[in-house]
Image: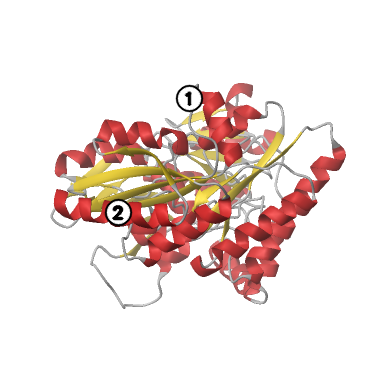
Amino acid sequence: MTTDQPGPATWLAALAATLQGVELDVSAAGLEAHGHDESGQHHAWPEAVVYAQTEADIVAVLAFASRHRVPVTPYAVGSSLEGHVVPLHGGISLDVSRMTRILEIVPESGYAVVEPGVTYPELNRQARRHGLHFAVDPGAEASLGGMAATGASGTAAVRYGTMHDNVLTLRVALMNGEVIEVGSLARKSSAGYDLKNLFVGSEGTLGVFTRLAVRLHPLPSAVASVQVGFCSIQEATAASLLVLASGLHPERLELVDTESIRAVNRWRGTALPGGPTLWIELSGRDTADLEGGLKLARELLVESGGTLIGEARSEAERTELWAARHGAFYAIRAMYPGHHGRTTDLCVPIGRLAEAISGTLAILDRLKLDAPLLGHVGDGNFHVYLHADPSDAGRLAALDVASAEMVTLALSLGGTCSGEHGVGAGKRSYMRAQHGPALEVMRGVKTLFDPHGLLNPGKILPD
């Protein structure tokens, strides 16, 4: 990052004069609200918050920041989990949460054009009337711009892919004042470098999204979900792999361990049977097709040692059945009030998933950490909630050791330090181990787009 940044008093007055008609917030409440994300692991206040409402507002902020050498950190709804939106170097928090227009839904081509502050649940509410849905579901009420920035995925990635697969085009404001459009609305393109997928997952370090076109999928004709309990997490993992190998192509395939079930029961006041649990959602061309898939799934799960807990077909029933899985993260956090917590996000090839989970459990056992495990096992992605009382220095240190050892394990199995949360500030230290010499190529790309290091400094690339 550049070292000739002027003091806030110097540039704040100039910013206010430059952004006539654009809301500028320097209140303590506004700055504090933009100084953390959902994880609570990183805290740093900006000197100012700018609420952009148009692409021109974003361009004006970046132009000002470039002239005055002021850091800019994009912000939408703050649901990230690795400190992505935390302004570690101060400067401007560029809030796009008021850019919430759904500009176009094109049913015949299966896409929507939206501003970056639109949340995916809102897009789904609007797309549903056309018989369509946006399939990337990270759980939190995340914005589409933020989801594209972090390369998010979620429970439906096993069937529909991640944001890399579901973002078609991006309009991106660059630090040099240009606005470029990358990607294509066509079903395929072999014309030039894939800049769209360079920006998806760039976490606001290369440019700021002003508009996105995202893929919409037809709503399934017939859908059902089942919930199945197991005696061990190893059995549940093996069963999930068997379902995938059968060719059933589930819409969702999720795993929650015993500790997570206990947290959900306590949080929601439910009485779900304890033990590792799989949730599986299947779809079919019609009811007969769906019933055939369900019959095979039940047989495979029972043969693997599973016990059917619940089954749901209507939308209301499925929502209730899945409520425990969707609320697991918040239930787990509520179970350890006051604890320092962090959520890992490892992903490995499907064939190595059993090894990854067994190895992770061994690490936790050796370090005497009781850390709930859950994940999108349908695509080899799982999470562990590491937590400790802030007053327990030894246990806090063990969290760092566990996190590092889990990443080392995932990389040794051909995996990655993050399947969907992104790098942010939390996982920068693992980037060299994962990417080796390619990390310097990434630095070159960063310098090309952001020569003064002003866009979301302190993220992705280690110092």
SS at mark 1 in the image? loop
Residue 452 is situated, as x and y percent measured from the top left of the image, at: 63, 59
The crowd level at tag 2 (other Cα within 10 Å; few <14, some 14-19, many 20+) is: many
> Which quadrant holds residue 11?
top right
Residue 52 is situated, as x and y percent measured from the top left of the image, at: 43, 37
Q: Is residue 435 left or right of residue 106?
A: right
Is 346 located above or below residue 445 in the figure? above
98 or 431: nearer the eye? 431
What residue would you read off at disc 1? Answer: 270
Q: Residue at x 39, y 60 (%)?
A: 243
Q: Residue at x 25, y 49 (%)?
A: 112
Residue 105 is situated, as x and y percent measured from the top left of the image, at: 20, 47
303 or 52: nearer the eye? 303
Is residue 84 in view? yes
32 or 348: nearer the eye? 348
Q: Residue at x 42, y 48 (%)?
A: 155
289 or 58: nearer the eye? 289
Of label 1 and label 2, which has the lower sequence position?
A: 2
Residue type, label 2: Ala
Q: CA distance from mark 1 to mark 2?
A: 40 Å
Residue 140 is situated, as x and y percent measured from the top left of the image, at: 46, 38
In the rendered image, the residue lying farthest to the right is 394
Q: Is residue 157 left or right of residue 265?
A: left
What residue would you read off at disc 2? Answer: 213
Q: Is residue 205 left or right of residue 144?
A: right
Is residue 175 in view? no
Is 78 located above or below residue 354 in the figure? above
Residue type, label 1: Thr
Q: Is residue 37 left or right of residue 283?
A: right
Q: Nearer the viewer, mark 1 or mark 2?
A: 1
